[in-house]
């Protein structure tokens, strides 16, 4: 997924705020569902929640940059999935995140539905 950096994404020096990298990765994960005509949340309020994440900020993005967010599966379990998301600027990795998502239903960990697993299988 491509993202262009606008003024609203940056500080006064034109450098992207650190929290925006998390937002960009979240958008890329949501787009995986939207691009297949699905919502990331079930009609019953079920969906994925973040259990843990580890981020490495390698070099800053700046106003006007066009970034590419990639997502890969690291591990899949019954109720959780671990992903590696990276952000690139001109084929140079500038950010990397390992994130573990847990599927919940009624606020409790639950087996990931097959329709959601199929989305991640395409990565």
Image (tube, rainbow, N blue to C red):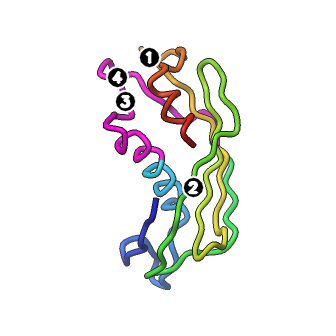
Label 4 with label 3: CB-CB less than 8 Å = yes
- Looking at the image, tell me whether mark 3 or mark 2 is earlier in sequence order: 3
Gap between marks 3 and 1 measured at Cα: 10 Å
Q: Which residue is mark 4?
A: 45
Q: Position of residue 31 (x, y in %)?
A: 40, 47
Q: Position of residue 123 (x, y in %)?
A: 57, 43
Describe residue 103's horizontal placement relative to residue 94 as left or right: left
Q: Which residue is mark 3?
A: 41
- Looking at the image, tell me whether mark 3 or mark 1 is earlier in sequence order: 3
Q: Circle 3 sits in a helix, a strand or a loop, which is it?
A: loop
Q: Residue at x 51, y 79 (%)?
A: 62
Q: Residue at x 63, y 72 (%)?
A: 91
Q: Which residue is mark 1?
A: 105
- Looking at the image, tell me whether mark 4 or mark 2 is earlier in sequence order: 4
Q: Which residues are magenta?
A: 29-53
Gap between marks 1 and 4 measured at Cα: 7 Å
């Amino acid at each position: 997924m491509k993202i262009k950096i606008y003024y609203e994404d940056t500080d006064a020096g034109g450098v992207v705020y650190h929290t925006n990298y998390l937002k960009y990765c979240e958008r890329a994960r949501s787009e995986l569902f939207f691009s297949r005509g699905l919502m990331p949340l079930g009609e019953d309020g079920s969906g994925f929640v973040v259990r843990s994440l580890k981020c490495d900020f390698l070099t800053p993005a700046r106003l006007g940059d066009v970034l590419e967010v990639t997502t890969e599966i690291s591990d899949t379990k019954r109720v959780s999935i671990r992903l590696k998301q990276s952000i690139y600027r001109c084929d140079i990795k500038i950010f990397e995140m390992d994130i573990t998502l847990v599927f919940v239903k009624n606020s409790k960990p639950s087996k990931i539905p097959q329709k959601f697993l199929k989305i991640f299988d395409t990565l």
